[in-house]
Image (tube, coloured by chain):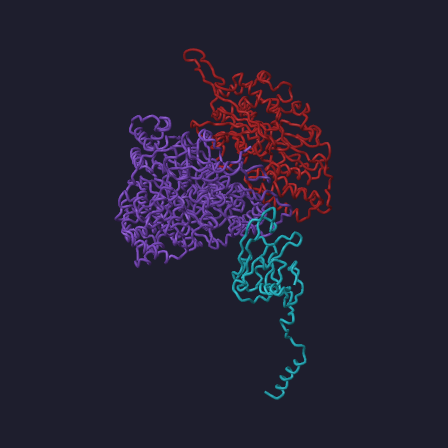
Chain colours: A purple, B red, C cyan
Amino acid sequence: MKVVVDGVTLDLPPGTSAIDAVFAAGSDVPYFCSQPYMSPIGACRMCLAKVGAPRKDRDGSWILDEETGEPKIFWFPNLMATCTTAVMDGMVVDTRSEPVKAAQNGMVEFTLINHPLDCPVCDKGGACELQDRAYEYGEGVSRFVFDKRHQEKHHALSDLITLDRERCIHCKRCVRYFEEVPGDEVLDFIERGGHTYIGTLEEGLPSNFTGNITDICPVGALLDATSRFRGRNWEYHHTETTSLDDASGSAIVVDGRTGRIERIKAGHHPEINKTWIDDGTRFGHEYADAPDRVRRPLVRHDGRLVETDWADAMDYVAARLTEVNGRDVGIAIRADATLEEGVAARALADHIGTGQLDHAPRPAGGVIAAGGQARLEELAVAGAILVVGDVTEEVPIVDLRIKDALRGVTPPSLFDHGAPIADLRLKERAPRHAEILTVAAPLRVDLMRHAGRAAQYPAGGERAFFHALTALAEGETPADGDLGMPLEAATAAVDGLRKAETAVVVLGGWVLASLQATEAALHFCRAVGAKPMLLGPMANSYGLELVGVAPSHARYAYGGMLTGAKALILSQLDPAIDPAVAERLDKLELLVVHASFLTATAKLADVVLPAAIGYEKDGTVVNLEGRMLPVRAAPVDAGESRDLTGFVKAFGEAAGQRLEGRSVKSARRWLKKGLGVDLDALPEHGGWAPAKRGPARVAVAVHEAPAHGGALRVPTMVRAEVLDRNPHLRAATGGLALGLHPDDAAALKLRSGDEVTVPVAGVPRRLVVRPSEAVPAGLATVPATPDEPVGLVPIDLKQIALERRALEVA
Amino acid sequence: MSTVADKPAAITSRFDPRYEITLYRHVGVDGAHTLEHYRARGGYRAAEKALTEMTPTQVIDEVKASGLRGRGGAGFPAGLKWSFMPPIDGRQRFIVCNADESEPGSFKDRYLMEDDPHQLIEGMLIAGWAIQATIGVLYVRGEYYVAYERMRDAIAEARAAGLLGRGVFATEPDGEGDEATPASPGFDFDIILHRGAGAYICGEETALMNSFEGLRANPRLKPPFPAQAGVYGLPTTINNVESFCSVVHIVERGGAWYASMGTDDSKGTKLYQLSGPVARPGVYEMPMGATFRELIYDLGGGPTEPAKALIPGGSSTPLLPWSDETLDLPMDYGTMARVGSMLGTGGVIVIPESQCMVDAMANVVRFYAHESCGKCTPCREGVATWLPKMYQKLLAGLGTRDDLTLMEEMVRNLRGTAFCPLADACAMPVAASFQHFRNEYEHLVDHGAPKYPTVSRWAE
Amino acid sequence: MSVLDIAKGMGVTLGHLFKKPMTVQYPEQKAPVQARFRGRHHLLRHPDTGLEKCIGCSLCAAACPAYAIYVEAAENDPANPTSAGERYASIYEINMLRCIFCGLCEEACPTGAVVLGHEFELADFRYQDFVYGKEDMLVGVKGAKWQRREAAAKGKDVELGFTAPPRPELEGVDY
């Protein structure tokens, strides 16, 4: 459609909003209430412009202007809010004439009359839309001589978010966000007229995606509590990188100041997380600056770990390694290491000459499906979705993209100015197609609230569940009880998957934990023509499998090397939390631990090397769809911490070798040669990983013992292993939870909030009791960590020890 | 305005022989609200005619032919609005009656509901048939408790009599052979009675729908219009009480009869409400295009004290100065628009000479400030915050000439910029008061005291 | 050049021999400074409540052309506030070696908390002694770091080497 904005003629698709036409033409109108990926509502009235359009006569021809002979432009009697006006053919928009300026000016004045203008103490100052717009469109003086509205200035909406009600300009972005994006209606306007304020019905914000409202708030009303007063916006160093907290590869911006990470904000990746991230990713950064971080290498002298430098420590390691047969050395890295670190680990293993190389956690079923897997964009438009697992906790962005599919609006195409500012297809309180979603899990999970069908199969019954579904798909009657839902519901789910143009089956960690369950699931996908989406346990599970950070034989896998190897090099892993493993590690000839904290394993080590955390690395990760994404280091003071490439460089120098993977650059040379990808030329939004696997090594499945036991290790959105070092998140989550059915808790005489220690698969876990109807009777849930991956494990509830009684609530 | 609350016997013009009373023929009659009374005087004959003898399209055509314009204030042609409903596609359709009569100066719907509830039910039944909506929603203003009770009882009565519910006017097969009329299943129609909680904004159609759904009463974005997505996102038509009542007579006596009354662009009869210092305030039914003089002098008995202005259609319409020309203006949509005002609901308020105009406008502004929903910036900050404060300042004798300029500019900024018409409703009368009575404002700021003493009738 | 010119020149010299000398025998004698003189900064307090005026907004640091100022803010304890409002400066440092005494910080300050005073005797020996913190600049602290150090060693009061007329912005500063 032909649209003329301030004299610039554009050709735009129908349905485009006038505000996007204005921005596409390079003109500008101010706006506060519109927000990309959310419905336009026209509440702030800032984006007013003079709009006109030609009209057609009764006979279908344009009414012509008598003077010019061109179609006559009929101007609308009032100025139009461009965010809620759709473009019409021949429409003319004027954003620069006097009445428009006067109106915009007037709106700025109205907006500011009740705004406290406490910019110097406001954490939004310098990055505030109202500040910018007031500067660009305001008069600079106020004619409002009365007292401003006084309301609560420091209202803790939750442990993570502070609300300043005086600063609120009622744009309704936050209220709409909760209804439209995560679908949790936890915030609304209260009162009316000049007394309107936002608030919650209950205490806190019961949603997993609350932090995004601090990003979209156009003023400093909603602020991140973790970065409260930590710095001004112009002082922050913004690093656009990829989150290493889960396998989604969400774009984040790390804001640091004077060597500290002060906050994380959502980045923009239109095909992955759009502009949303979960609270675990956003608020879970405080551990990076924890006071007990290991900042210098430590070497054991006379039984004590003594600080030294990298060269000394590596001389020691290289010398000691010569005493051990290379084949007896085990190397294990955590699955959120970058591709480059994976290359470094391989190079190290090759140099030492060991086949005992692995990454952990590594699910038995692998994370790369042979026939290709669904992309997040496909998930967002899928006509039928089956989820097995707790995606909200495993990869929260997948949860949001599923909710996109429920709304049934395809992702918008981008303009030069980015995502559409006002996507007119999006509506407030749009109906959701819950019927396309089926969620199955051994316990009641959050996503089930949004699902048309929910199935609760017995814990550990993933394989049987998929066998039963496959039987249904093949026209047979499945065994009773395996489905966890009525037969009709299961039939409807299977039919939906089969009929949908795009059908996706999301496989969570409980499925991938078992090779047989994964195979059953992939078989089912083929049977109904659905694409699988495998949720890897950590940020680079896909990449490390791709590069081949894997043992040369099944018995050399991580679990095996803990018992079989004589010397171990462990990066960021902490197996010694299991006392039985700790006992074995203590007897090793050499234990080198590359860790950020003095973990149980590091305390046993001969050498501890400070490891860089995800925000401190440069490199590349491959997310669960197989998309390579850049990781960039924020300027953070992490002492002498290095990533694995730095480790290998120092080791090579000590050993007198120039090892491959001694730097990000060198690792990339290897990747270019080995996989044929040029990571230096990676596009801004990443690129697809090659189908080709890394040479030489083949991923071998870990030997799979049948899962049994009374405890289900569940994924958590927060990094469970460092939760104690994330004080804000810890306060918000209430600590790591031992989920019990209320009856089971009552039988154990435990009440909510009790702190207990209980052995789970031999590991004593300190947990907070949380009785919940969501957990089936007879099952306990404990949070998984990288060293204790998801799955069914034994628990000894008889040995539960009460550490601290919760206060009785009257 | 005590004359409005207690209802004098002569509130209607039914004793005036010049005008035929249709809508208000039962108003003021004892016991008129019962089904028995209504049916005894030909009630539900129009509905029976529409449902058994006419197709929905015929009903809509009849209403179009009558030229009936919506009586809620905006004056949109009712038949045209009904024809906007999408084709029947199996979705539930709604007919909504806006009985949230909250405009200051308007009180016609109240008596229609209190004294003649069955007329409204019949009108909704006919409209429901016309647009094939099986659910009617009657949203009654929260403060109208008697009206609510009468409507509640009347709906129960109608249900018991089979005039609401399943198979309204169902017929058995009649006759034999070729002349037999087949059985008709009748029309399924019922009314949900909903009582508002007392918010002026709920008179805005989309806010009313939100309120009915249990949501915050904020106006919705249009488009989509109610015909596409109304109550619960389903096709909906919404009209005023008076419009529905008029439909009964249009169907009964034909659109042509209705169109024979009134003026070129405004047909039929209209309920005019007269308040202020006049001898006989009340609701008067007159053909469209009757003049102010007829209403105020002939029916209302003339002002009891010298008047200086009149508000033609409820507090949201710009006032007109009192003059012979004004009094001779016909009260119809076109004329009112031509002189820069609106017919609105037809609530004529006479403003006496002794009334301080600034004070009167302060009262109007206070009302709209209280009723602003807070959704959009100009209304929340301008109407609900700044403007009332400016009036407070003026009336406290602290105003300056600059303040008047500021207020005029503010009012200009409010016009046409807000999300819904509430801000306009506040800005237009204020702008008109500045246009016609700027001298009173100037007197106030120059002397620190109003030209006319602020009278107790406007007091808090 | 004539003899007359030489005589003229000599005359000027001669004339100065009988004028009052400009030289001030500093430090024995106190140097007078003008009211407009800009020396090292003072951090002021509200005279009535005693609360610090500084709210830790960092605008001075943003305005500083020499990057001499570093501020870290924190939240006030409502029971025992440091400054008025929610926010105060937990760290406020000015590097006097970097400072060019331009006064832009004073202009940028929204609360009038940082004001350039008259003290100019800032020479010291070690780099870290040029970094002045809150404890060195808050109202009531007299003298540069070295002056206070020496005074403490000698058990005397700090003696400043100048006299200055009062300036209204320097509320509560006593020389």
Residue A325, placed above or below residue A452:
below
**Of all residues shown, which one is farthest toward the top?**
B176
Quadrant in which residue B29 is drawn: top right
- Residue A650 position, x and y percent, is 35, 57
> Which residue lies most toward the bottom here?
C3
Residue A534 placement, left or right of C167: left
Q: Residue furthest front?
A: A302
Q: Nearer the viewer, residue C104 or A797?
A: A797
Q: Which is nearer the eye, B9 or A73?
A: B9
Say which residue appears at 63% left-offset and 84% top-offset.
C10
The quarter of the image holding the N terminus of chain B is top right
Q: Is residue B417 above or below residue B2?
A: below
Furthest-left residue in this view? A696
Q: Is residue A125 visible?
A: yes
Q: Is residue A427 visible from the viewing direction of this image? A: no
Residue A667, quarter of picture? bottom left
Q: Residue A259 placed where, x, y %?
A: 46, 54
Relative image position of residue A30 (x, y in whole percent): 51, 48
Labels in figure, total: 0
Would you place residue A477 above or below residue A314 in this image? above
Q: Does A400 sit above or below residue B285?
A: below
- Residue A629 is left or right of residue C34, and the answer is left
Occupied quadrant, residue B32: top right
Q: Nearer the viewer, residue C17 or A266?
A: C17
Q: Is residue A391 left or right of residue C4?
A: left
| Percent x, y of residue A345 | 32, 51
Quadrant of image for the C terminus of chain B = top right
